Image (spheres, rainbow, N blue to C red):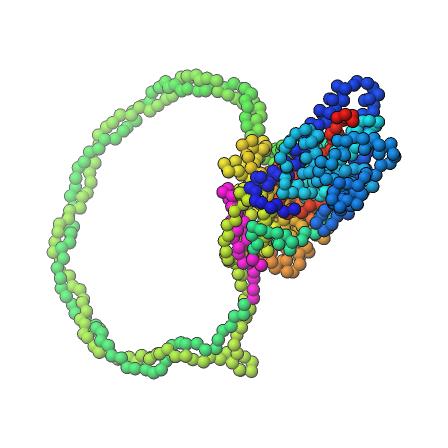
Amino acid sequence: MEPTGRKTGAERGSAVLVVVLYIAVAIAALSFVSSSRVVAETNAQGVLEGESRALNAAFAQIHLAMNVVTNSAYDGQNRNLELRAAVAGDNGGTVAGATQTEPLYTTEAEETAYGSVAWLDSTVDPPYGFLVGTNVRVYAARDYVQRIQRLRDTTIAPVDPTGLSDSYFVLEAAGRNGDVVRLVSALVRENEPFSSFVFFQNRGTLGISGAPRGLIHANESIDFYFPDGLYQDDVSSVEGFGFQAGATPDNTSLMNANPEARRIDLAAVDFEDLKSKADFFVGQDGLDAEILFTADGQARIQEFTPPYFEMVTQSRTDETEELVKVGEQEVTYEEEVIDHWIDEDYWTTEQVQIGENIEDRTRDVEVQVGTEEVVHTRTEPIYEWQTVTRYRSVQVWVPYNSGADGGTSVGGGGAGELGEYEWVQEPYDSDEQVQVGEEIIEYTVTEPVFETVTEDYTVTVPVFEDQDVLKTRQIPVYVTVTQTRMEDIYEWQEVEKEIQVNDYEPVTTTWDEEVWNPPTLVDTTYVQLSGTDGGMIYIDGRITSMEGELQGRLTVVGNEKIRVTGNIQYVDDDGDTAMLNGTDYREVYERNPDYDARNVLGVIARDDIVFTHELPSSTELTGTFLAAQGRVGIDAFWADSTGELHPDSESNRETYLTAEQREKERAYDRHSDYKTMPFVKNSLRRTGGLISNNRIMETYVTMEDGSSQVTAGFKRGNMKFDISLLHNPPPNFVVVPRPVLTYYAPVLAVRDDF
């Protein structure tokens, strides 16, 4: 049912929760009050036994009713036909047009006892119908609130008048023993949103590790990786469990596991139907998009043409324009040439040696005259042997710690614990001589004794003087003459050329050249998310980038592949994130008490949803991601026909991609931001779920040096399950056609004088 008025995103997101929580709390409160009343009336053992019989009879009817609901068929809108038939009055009740007005009593005594309880059959109660073949009443959940109000003798305004909780119903069974009537109510959702799963995989073996919270299901098998796994919520598979990389049944804790579960079909997603429901934005046919969520509650959508290669035919024409010789002309010019040489006398002043002088000189020299004994001192260290601590760099194996509530999806052939070798400083003891002091030592040496003496010696010194000298040199004599030369004359002309082949006919040369056409921005649109009821965005082509801070209730649908390129975090009006420490794996990943919004994100892709090399080293993603025909997980892997994954390589592309797919990926790989690339990053922290047709993988491990190491993906994983996704899925998100018993409890233990 569509709402008739507009609500804020927070109001819309909480409307269903109000119905569910009100009924659950009210049921529990009535159970406590009425049980206390019974004890106050009497403590007789017989009465208590009667109350127990009535309660058991009511529970038995509820279980019978749930079998009917569980085995019901569903229509094309995933509505439970038996629940819908009951509230329509097809099996009787007080609904207008009911075909039967009385319940199916088994005996006349039961009819008399049941009919004598006036408050039970009050005509002022909201309308109800009966589930086929049972005495169990079926109410619309929002209508049942009025019944609880009357039983509690309170008056409260109607809850969810616009019908946002239309998928919720209450089954009510009355158990009778004598004059005692005991009611049991069960709150049932007729279908289950896929956002209820933290991991759901349709094909291939699902590999998981750590301590994830939330529902986990595989339509084939599940492999548990690494020791000490803790799985507190439902874990189910159709083809059994396996244990890998050191995990065993003894060191893996499974609180509620079913290795022989019923298959849950990942329904074929109708993308045309989703496109028709996209009220926020519908992209142009054939265009890719980049989506950025901003903290002010908007989404920026930039549409691009997809990149592609094309073959372009090039040719060389025969005609060209060039300089052509058209004649010659005589040109005269003058130049200077040497006619002859003449001698020229000139004077120059030079230094000329005219003789020598003998000079007497003296000098001081050191002469050894003997030796002497000299006493010297020196300082020497004193050592002793001691044990000292030294450090050396060594490689040690360091395991990854995902945290007590963390988890991740795993693939690869690793074994043992998961971690990596790191260089660390290791202390060790060393016996060494250590200086503990100093001492002064005297020693004698023989040294030479010198004295200074003066000696005479002579030197010969040349004598120079300046003199004028007459010299001769040759200089050239120039004359000017007139010369002539012939020069060619050119002009630009169009000429026709021929390329001669064997038959000597002219040809035109052509060739094919591959040209890459990059993405071109076509349009930019801003969509307001916060302050609205929530809605959908539909992109016809590939979503090449998606990241940012989200405010609002949103489902993004991509008709091809979706690439996650940055953190996606929920924020409120104050900028508080839903989780603390999402981008710091060294700190505890926990809910932020200051966060006060009800944001929700669903992402649906026809093909893959890949976490790319552009993500930061420590990444946080909030939201539920569903790949209808592809996979969710790290980039640079290709799925085979069974859903298993293989690392990116030319040979694997040849094996697992069609020629058309290979050509398309080659065009995207030419763009550095869109390129398919393997990576290893520190951590991925998530709040939400992954629903995938093929294998989910956030971490790929291999054996190296006898231990498991991450060779692609995230070294550490930590995830939380967003409990609001059980009752507050993203707008128009895909549902599972199976009923869910959300809550049941006894609501009343009274006698006929209540």
Q: Is residue 529 left or right of residue 240?
A: left
- Looking at the picture, tell me which residue is in the foreground, 508 or 183: 183
What residue is shown at x 50% (from left), y 56% (from top)? Answer: 523
Quarter of the image where the C terminus is located: top right
Which region is colored magenta?
Answer: 284-311
Q: Is residue 352 left or right of residue 167?
A: left
Residue 424: quadrant of the picture: top right
Q: Examine the rendering and report whether any part of residue 249 can be seen.
A: no
x, y percentage for residue 579? Answer: 57, 35
Residue 14: quadrant of the picture: top right
| Residue 272 vertical placement versus 476 (above, below) | above
Residue 67 belongs to the span the image colors magenta? no
Q: Examine the rendering and report whether any part of residue 525 can be seen.
A: yes
x, y percentage for residue 13? Answer: 60, 40
Prevailing secondary structure class for the magenta stretch in the rendered image: strand
What residue is shown at x 56% (from left), y 22% (from top)? Answer: 431
What residue is shown at x 77% (from left), y 47% (from top)? Answer: 73
x, y percentage for residue 244? Answer: 72, 39
| Residue 430 vertical placement versus 540 (above, below) | above
Residue 302 belongs to the span the image colors magenta? yes
Q: How many numbered dots are placed on residues in this image?
A: 0
x, y percentage for residue 693? Answer: 69, 48
- Looking at the picture, tell me which residue is in the foreground, 595 or 30: 30
| Residue 128 vertical placement versus 343 (above, below) | above
What residue is shown at x 79% (from left), y 18% (from top)? Answer: 43
- Looking at the picture, tell me which residue is in the foreground, 607 or 273: 273
Residue 23: quadrant of the picture: top right
- Looking at the picture, tell me which residue is in the foreground, 723 or 343: 723
